[in-house]
């Protein structure tokens, strides 16, 4: 930690000693050359930021992810660090990327202004922004700046995350440092294609880094399905290359920056009465009211790093978490041909399996979920079996579903009819499975009634089955002992529901909820499933068998 004595010494020592000392510790550099930014006492989390940047400078890791509350000073510290890299020539081609290019240009405008006007910098490092003193007035009037090259041959350029990173070259150098900010906003998280494009951009820039290239990501944890969540997961899987620092404005009643924020309006009024406007503290009580004034829980997402509390999850998160804890150490009672079974067949109950199909090419899965209903209308129901494979073809999946049905009394099967589901339904008909769900439709023009095998998804009925399944689970009507299904339920969001309703596939976003969709279809069978009295089953000699079913 930088002591007051050391800072005072730096202020009085000779230039060479001062320049050397500030190069060794970025915090010292920031506090000496940018003293005007230190209005409030430095909080503990910012000392950690300076420590991480010292390690970053020494090449201890490649990717630094700061997920911090709004006004945590992460952007200001990153801009000062760019100045540090320029004056000490730590990097050669620095890129600043934001979703909105105007934000990137605004950051470069601040950086260029500091290079032009910071007297301490100019005194110790010379004029790095321009060579002709007559240019001062021209450049200080600029409100946007897309790129510049310093007099010590460092290029800094602004970009948007909506454009590619290929072909970025300065002299013989590829980008060796990125600062990526505002890549996840309310606007980006509301659009799956935009989020996919941001994720693709980040993957591309990482792939195009120079050998010594590094990236600083500045973000808020706004969505559990966005780019920040993906990077948090990636960092957990690769701790050598990543460092992650997550800071909420308050946690368990403890304020992260106590010299800047207080809890109540009453405290703020009392403290601010004796201070200049520049040194006023901020009331979290008032900030909460201001940010959530529109009805959206912006405070929870942007100040608390808590998108869950912001109301995005579709299922009751607390209930799902409790069930996950309850079942994660329990195994299925048995696994037959890939079908995890959680309860044996009892002849007095009604059963049904729902099926979600796929192409079987390693992306989403063919999934089957079975539910046991009581003899009545569904009270006391339980998920009794789950199966998923992302390599099985939809026609072969029919054999799997038939095997599942046979294990539970030749019960009702309801594979989804749409797209690849046609192959599954057709094969079930060919192998003469006796109970396939029939969807009855009446033509409004001529009142003609048609009966199609399989459950057909439409824009009108998809959302309804998810809501029905959620209600049953939240109300305790349906027990879910499957960890895999519960994990899908935990991750499922309102935006995922919108995508499911449209059956939308977005390149770059690999969020599949196949077990959940199959479970929702199975729950839809609660009114039509019947108690069955199966005949003894014996496989015909010539009947095909799935390689996936033992």
Image (cartoon, grey):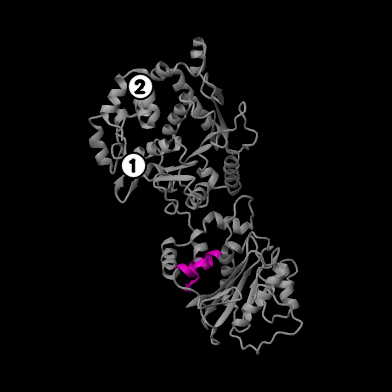
Q: Is residue 204 left or right of residue 475?
A: right
Q: Is residue 405 magenta?
A: no
Q: Quadrant of the C terminus?
A: bottom right
Which dot, 2 or 1, sits closer to the camera?
2
Q: Nearer the viewer, residue 118 or 426?
A: 118
Quarter holding residue 259: top left
Q: Which residues are magenta?
A: 466-484
Q: Verify whether residue 473 appears in magenta.
A: yes
Residue 405 location in percent, x, y? 62, 79
Which residue matches tag 1?
A: 286
- Residue 170 found in image quarter: top right
Marks counted in the figure total: 2
Q: Which residue is mark 2?
A: 17
Q: Indicate the quadrant where residue 13 lies.
A: top left
In front of the other: 398 or 64? 64
**Nearer to us in this view, 220 or 85:** 85
Image quarter hosting the N terminus: top left
Q: Is residue 181 visible?
A: no
144 relative position to 437: left or right: left
């Amino acid at each position: 930690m930088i002591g007051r004595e050391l800072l005072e010494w730096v202020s009085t020592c000779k230039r060479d000693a001062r320049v050397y000392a500030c190069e060794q510790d970025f915090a010292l550099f920031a506090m000496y050359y940018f003293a005007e930014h230190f209005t409030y006492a430095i909080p503990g989390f910012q000392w950690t930021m300076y420590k991480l940047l010292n390690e970053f400078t020494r090449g201890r890791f490649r990717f630094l992810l700061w997920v911090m509350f709004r006004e945590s000073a992460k952007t200001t510290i990153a801009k000062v660090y760019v100045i540090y890299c320029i004056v000490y020539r730590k990097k050669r081609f620095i890129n600043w990327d934001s979703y909105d290019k105007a934000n990137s240009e605004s950051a470069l405008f601040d950086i260029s202004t500091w290079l032009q006007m910071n007297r301490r910098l100019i005194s110790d490092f010379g004029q790095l922004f321009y060579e002709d003193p007559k240019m001062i007035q021209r450049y200080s009037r600029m409100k946007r700046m897309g790129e510049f090259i310093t007099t010590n041959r460092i290029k800094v350029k602004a970009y948007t995350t909506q454009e590619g990173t290929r072909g970025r070259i300065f002299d013989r150098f590829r980008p060796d440092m990125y600062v990526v900010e505002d890549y996840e906003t309310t606007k980006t998280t509301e659009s799956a294609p935009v989020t996919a494009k941001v994720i693709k951009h980040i993957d591309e820039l990482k792939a195009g880094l120079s050998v010594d290239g590094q990236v600083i990501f500045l973000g808020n944890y706004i969505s559990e399905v966005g780019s920040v969540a993906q990077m948090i997961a990636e960092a957990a899987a690769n701790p050598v290359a990543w460092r992650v620092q997550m800071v909420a404005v308050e946690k368990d009643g403890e304020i992260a920056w106590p010299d800047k924020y207080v809890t109540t309006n009453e405290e703020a009024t009392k403290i601010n009465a004796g201070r200049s406007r520049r040194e006023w503290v901020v009331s979290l009580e008032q900030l909460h009211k201001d940010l959530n004034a529109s009805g959206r829980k912006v405070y929870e997402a942007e100040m608390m790093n808590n998108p869950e509390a912001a109301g995005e999850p579709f299922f009751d998160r607390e209930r799902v978490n409790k069930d996950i804890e309850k079942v994660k150490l329990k195994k299925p009672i048995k696994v037959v041909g890939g079908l995890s079974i959680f309860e044996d067949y009892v002849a007095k109950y009604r059963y049904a399996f729902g099926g979600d199909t796929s192409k079987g090419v390693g992306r989403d899965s063919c999934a089957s979920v079975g539910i046991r209903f009581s003899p009545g209308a569904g009270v006391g129901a339980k998920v009794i079996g789950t199966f998923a494979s992302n390599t099985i073809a939809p026609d072969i999946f029919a054999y799997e579903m038939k095997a599942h049905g046979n294990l539970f009394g030749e019960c009702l099967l309801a594979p989804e009819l749409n797209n690849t589901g046609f192959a599954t339904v057709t094969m079930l008909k060919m192998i003469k499975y006796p109970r396939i769900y029939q969807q009855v439709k009446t033509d409004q023009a001529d009142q003609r009634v048609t009966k199609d095998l399989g459950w057909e998804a439409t824009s009108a009925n998809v959302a309804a089955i998810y809501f029905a399944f959620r209600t049953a689970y939240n109300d305790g009507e349906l027990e879910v002992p499957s960890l895999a299904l519960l994990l899908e339920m935990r991750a499922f969001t309102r935006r995922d529901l919108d995508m499911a309703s449209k059956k939308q596939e977005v390149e770059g976003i690999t969020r599949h909820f196949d077990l959940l969709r199959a479970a929702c279809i199975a729950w839809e069978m609660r009114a039509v499933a019947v108690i069955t009295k199966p005949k003894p089953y014996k496989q015909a000699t010539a009947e095909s068998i799935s390689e996936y079913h033992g």
